[in-house]
Amino acid sequence: MRIMPFFKRPLIHVVWAALLLSAVSPRTLAAALPDFTQLVEQAAPAVVNISTTHTVDQKAAGKQFSLPNQDQLPDIFKRFFERQFPQQKPRQQGSNPKPQSLGSGFIISDDGYVLTNHHVIEGADKIIVALSDRREMAAELVGSDPRSDLALLKIDADKLPYLILADSDQLKVGEWVLAIGSPFGFDHSVTAGIVSAKGRSLRTETYVPFIQTDVAINPGNSGGPLFNLDGEVVGINSQIYTRSGGFMGLSFAIPSNSATSVVAQLRDHGAVSRGWLGVQIQEVSQDLAESFGLEKAAGALIAQVIEGSPALDAGLQAGDVITSVNGHEIILSAQVAHFIGALVPEEVADIGLVRNGENLYIEVVIGTLPDQVAAALGEPEQGQYLARIGLRVASVPAEKAKAWRIGHGVEIIEADQGVAQELGLQAGDVITSIANQRIENVEQIVGLVAQLPLHRSISLRLVRQGRPLYVAFRLNQ
């Protein structure tokens, strides 16, 4: 029997289909969608608004922006600069700074423990928690953890409504989720969407396997809870991906399972200790997978084993490809940090790896992440984005420059579109010249790329795994 496409069928069929759809009542259609009303009624009282005050540097605050000979500019330009750089009056001696609403949080115990994001309270002199019943209370900072972007607060109250951290591992992609927070200061705003992905890695937080959603999150939502349909907290809203400053359909939440461990350590010790393996790793490309005898481009390639590390003591080697940690398959290299960082120091981890084409399993006694390593990881270089060629670049790490014997260039930390994709450029490559001009630093390449001509062949020299390579490209815009 031949099936006729819908758009080619006789008009009467289309009309009948429309009539059938119109016969479905709005109540029937609504029944197919989740009803969040009861969830919000039960959960909202435990969600709080968080505001802070900061000490202002009076010397810095008193500085005014000006241009040379600004008084001689035409009036139209004077008005432009006045709008862009308004003159601020210094705060009078003895006046109190006004608290600014920065984010959200939620109560996790009836005796007043509150969970929020580290970046919401970072650098605060005073933290104010506003409850749903309009009470405002000064909060004590129990502890915060920049690496997971979580902070634990304590307010002096009891018999409070509170929320429970659920098992985020049970969350499924495509599942409905709901957020409550204070975007732009609008308290207890509710937004909903679905889980877009799990286990996302962001460059700013190495140890967090983020939950990605399409729930509308905006400034002020940070630190608020993400619920499943059972009213359980499965995540803490933390970040959005945006090029406009507002919501663009990509929001990220810290899984509740990651938060549970952090909260326990902050409550007991005021700080967080993380497991440490002691290796530098990189992604496995298709070419590397073939060269190492792997069936697919997955795993984490060990580029270096750090001296005095648990990995060295256990016999891990540069060139090993980590394929699993305690039975969890490793697809992307960032997953190693997720799993190892979640382990307790002195715990034994079963590391699956491929060495010279052979599958091995090695037990490693996990160490404690040293303070100097944590500090280095605490503020990763964000680099500079070069929109014309779709690259984000940063300074070349000293160890890589020494190992690859290169004295100049910039490292690619992200290659996401345009020329970068066409040329197959990869994170970790080092660009040493463009248009036959030697690249010394990030500032230089920013200026050079901005001046590249259109519709002409441009050479680019890069170093990949210590080997130099020339490629050429053209810019059309």
Image: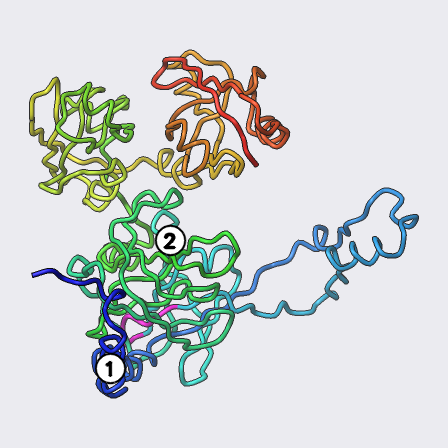
| Amino acid tagged 1 | Leu
Quick check: is 107 in the magenta stretch? yes
- What percent of the width, then of the height, locates residue 104? 42, 68
Residue tagged 1: 29
Secondary structure, mark 2, is loop
Residue 231: mark: none
Q: Quadrant of residue 137?
A: bottom left
Does residue 293 sit above or below 4 in this rendering?
Answer: above
- Left or right placement of residue 239 versus residue 261 in this view: right
Quickly name the residue at label 2.
149
Closest to the observer: 289 or 264?
289
Going from N to C along the chain, the mark reached first, 2 or 1, is: 1
Q: Residue at x 23, y 87 (%)?
A: 23
Q: Label 2 to label 1, Cα distance in Å?
A: 40 Å
The amino acid beneath tag 2 is Asp
Residue 427 placed where, x, y %? 38, 30
